[in-house]
Image (spheres, rainbow, N blue to C red):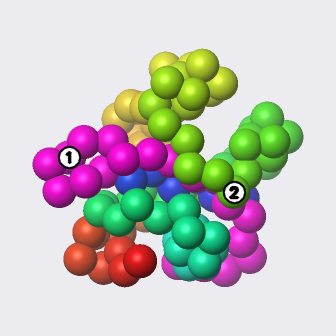
Amino acid sequence: MYWISFVDEQDHFAGAVIVESAGGFGGALEEAIRRGLNPGGQALVMEIPARHRDQARPYRHRLMQRDELLRVFGPLAGGQELRERAGDHAQVICAKCNRQ
């Protein structure tokens, strides 16, 4: 299960989606594209740790905006701290490489 957050060309948050995929980071992004959930821009793809998957599962396969993310997942959902905690379990995909 993966979390993908998107930012536009001006580095403004464009939404986040949780997808299930067995295809790694690239497969997760492809799943978001297949489902029409990729708004474009730079994508940060992170594997969701097993201990958090039950909490994330009800929110799969839909594009969520900042207010909902903060309400459901708390302040960690929208910040740099999330990316830092993800470490090797995350990959940034540049806007040019994120084809829709």
Within 10 Å of disc 2 (Cα), the crowding (few <14, some 14-19, many 20+) is some
**Which sits earlier in the primary sequence, circle 1 or circle 2?**
1
Determine the residue located farthest toward the front in the rendered image.
36
Q: Which residues are magenta?
A: 7-27
Looking at the picture, tell me which residue is in the foreground, 76 or 37.
37
User: Is any part of residue 25 visible from this angle?
Assistant: no
Reading the image, the residue beneath label 1 is 11
Q: Secondary structure at mark 2?
A: loop
Three-letter code for the amino acid on which mark 1 is drawn: Asp
Q: CA distance from mark 1 to mark 2?
A: 23 Å
Q: Is residue 24 magenta?
A: yes
The image shows residue 41 at horizontal and vertical percentages of 29, 62
Residue at horizontal 35%, vertical 35%? Answer: 80
Q: Secondary structure at mark 1?
A: loop
Q: Quadrant of residue 81?
A: top left
Reading the image, the residue beneath label 2 is 61
